[in-house]
Amino acid sequence: MEINWIVIGVVAIVLIVLILVMIKKNQKEKKKLTEFLNNDFKKSEEDEPDFEDTVNEK
């Protein structure tokens, strides 16, 4: 029984291409998520007093 190197080569190339496509897609999603988290965050009003300032005032 001989090893069919052509089939193994084609499968290896397809796997490498698939991995590269998945990495590229992951990087795009990571970039979109990072931009979303950095730009969509709205700081809420400060409800709690700053305790360091109140101590210094006394």
Image (tube, rainbow, N blue to C red):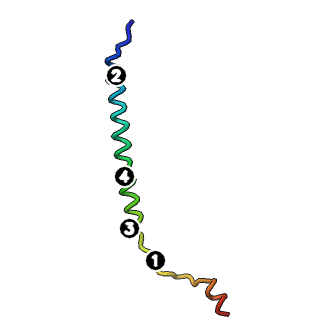
Q: Residue at x 38, y 12 (%)?
A: 3
Q: Which residue lies under the disc numbered 3? A: 39
Distance Cα–Cα, label 3 vs label 2: 45 Å
Q: Is residue 43 above or below residue 3?
A: below
Q: In front of the other: label 3 or label 2? A: 2
Q: In front of the other: label 4 or label 2? A: 2
User: Residue 44 appears at what percent x and percent y?
Assistant: 46, 77
Quarter-of-image position of residue 49: bottom right
Q: Residue at x 38, y 61 (%)?
A: 35
Q: Which residue lies under the disc numbered 2? A: 9
Which quarter of the image is occupied by the C terminus?
bottom right
Q: Amino acid type of disc 1?
A: Ser
Q: Is residue 37 above or below residue 16?
A: below
Q: In front of the other: label 1 or label 3? A: 3
Q: Which residue lies under the disc numbered 1? A: 44
Which of the marked residues, 1 or 3, is nearer the chain's N terminus? 3
Q: Amino acid type of disc 3?
A: Asn
Q: Which residue lies under the disc numbered 4? A: 29
Distance Cα–Cα, label 2 vs label 1: 57 Å
Residue 50 in the figure: left or right of residue 33? right
Q: Amino acid type of disc 4?
A: Glu
